[in-house]
């Protein structure tokens, strides 16, 4: 990467930083209900090679696509004029400026192998690599939780995406062989052992290549249902509704709102159970929870789609011990926790099932729980 940087910018970078994409193991739509999520950092990363400049100019280049070099001035960073992928690095610089950190001009080369738009958070991988680099280069000494909030500000207020803290928490705080148990109320994070290989398992990601076309409207309406549910039940957030309160809630809510609430309440419970089981019995014990999570999203929260359901059902029928859609829904990817001995069978069966259904071919790959953001040279 240093060589490519040299070709493009005519000198060597000051360093190279990387940050991973993430997969959410369990805990869907619980984040904005102040609940629990359990993502893990994956072995696919965005890398940035960066050299500080003596002026306030930023030059940005990605090895992906045909974007060409983009130049910006740190004195006039502005969300409206930032285009394409450069919103992510420029958003991070803007967010740091907002909190009074002097960001130097830089030359920056991005090289990422996190698939775009597959629900693995390629955008946060970029932001987390960039903030790690700038944190080191400026000597700002930000703690991971401060970097989490700065990247959230970049996404919310510069990129314009109403995202929470899950993706960047996984990318910044992840650790090899672990998942990151996050409490979205107090934003505390705890590492939970999650190693697939010693358990004879692989985590398959099945990207359906169905784009989240209903995602915006569907997301907004699910959020609204959750807010309505919390209001009627008289709680600050659905996090405060316990499993044993559900029966009473059924009498207070309309049928659809009740099912939305039931998904959030049971999903929070499943995250807690998954954390306990991973610590006490290992990943081979969580299959039923993954399955139940999918059923809840399919039937109660209604955010699955035919392609995701087929990926999940086919994986299960061919040896996966548990499978669920992951991410916001209405498309994107499913995960299937699969014995390594069944991996080929699951892959082949899913490809065949998609072919027979006349769906676009899925992309299937494995991920392992990997390290969070770091400097690599
Ligand atoms: P996700 O984060 O789920 O992958 P997003 O739509 O949030 O999907 O982010 C994808 C965007 O991130 C792309 O449209 C592109 O702007 C940017 N991006 C991701 N990886 C790269 C890359 N290697 N080079 C340039 N831009 C990238
Ligand atoms: Mg994203």
Image (cartoon, rainbow, N blue to C red):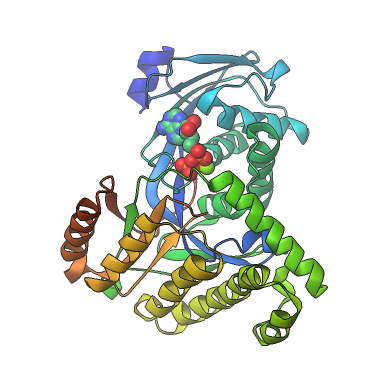
Q: Quadrant of the N terminus?
A: top left
Does 261 sit above or below residue 353?
below
| Residue 104 relative to residue 319: left or right | right
The answer to whether one can see residue 167 in this image is yes
Residue located at (63% from left, 68% from top): 256
Does 140 sit above or below residue 171?
above
| Residue 72 relative to residue 245: left or right | left
Residue located at (41% from left, 39% from top): 116
**Residue 320's x, y, as percent?**
28, 71
Picture quadrant where residue 83 is located: top right
Q: Nearer the viewer, residue 291 or 371?
A: 291
Residue located at (35% from left, 50% from top): 207
Q: Nearer the viewer, residue 315 or 189?
A: 315
| Residue 287 relative to residue 139: left or right | left
Does 269 sit above or below residue 161?
below
**Residue 201's x, y, as percent?**
28, 70
**Residue 334's x, y, as percent?**
38, 58
Residue that sits furthest to the front in the current view:
255
Picture quadrant where residue 36 is located: bottom right
| Residue 100 relative to residue 214: left or right | right
Q: Quadrant of the C terminus?
A: top left
Residue that sits furthest to the right in the current view:
234
């Amino acid at each position: 990467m240093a060589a490519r940087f040299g070709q493009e910018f005519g000198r060597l970078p000051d360093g190279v930083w990387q940050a991973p994409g993430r997969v959410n193991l369990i805990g869907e739509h619980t984040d904005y209900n102040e609940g629990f999520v359990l993502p893990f950092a994956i072995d696919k990363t965005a890398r940035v090679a960066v050299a500080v400049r003596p002026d306030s100019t930023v030059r940005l280049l990605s090895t992906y696509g045909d974007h060409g070099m983009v130049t910006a001035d740190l004195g006039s960073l502005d969300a409206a004029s930032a285009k394409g992928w450069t919103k992510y690095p420029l958003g991070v610089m803007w967010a740091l400026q907002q909190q009074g950190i002097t960001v130097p001009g830089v030359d920056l080369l991005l090289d990422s192998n996190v698939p775009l738009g597959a629900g693995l958070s390629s955008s946060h991988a970029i932001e987390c690599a960039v903030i790690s680099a700038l944190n080191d280069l400026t000597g700002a000494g930000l703690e991971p939780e401060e970097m989490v909030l700065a990247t959230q500000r970049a996404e919310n207020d510069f990129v314009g995406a109403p995202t929470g803290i899950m993706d960047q928490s996984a990318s910044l705080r992840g650790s090899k062989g672990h998942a990151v148990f996050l409490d979205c109320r107090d934003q505390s994070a705890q590492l939970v052992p999650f190693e697939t290989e010693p358990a004879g398992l692989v985590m398959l990601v099945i990207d359906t290549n169905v784009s989240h076309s209903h995602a915006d409207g569907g997301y907004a309406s699910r959020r609204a249902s959750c807010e309505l549910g919390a209001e009627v039940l008289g709680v600050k957030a659905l996090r405060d509704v316990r499993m044993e309160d559900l029966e009473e809630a059924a009498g207070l809510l309309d049928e659809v709102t009740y099912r939305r609430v039931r998904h959030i309440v049971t999903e929070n419970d499943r995250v807690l159970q998954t954390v306990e089981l991973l610590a006490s019995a290992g990943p081979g014990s969580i299959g039923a929870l993954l399955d139940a999570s999918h059923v809840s999203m399919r039937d109660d929260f209604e955010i699955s789609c035919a392609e995701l359901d087929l990926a999940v059902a086919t994986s299960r029928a061919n040896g996966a011990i548990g499978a669920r859609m992951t991410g916001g829904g209405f498309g994107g990817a499913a995960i299937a926790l699969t014995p390594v001995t069944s991996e080929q069978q699951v892959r082949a069966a899913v490809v065949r099932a998609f072919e027979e259904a006349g769906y676009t071919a899925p992309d299937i790959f494995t991920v392992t729980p990997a390290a969070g953001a770091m400097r690599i040279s």
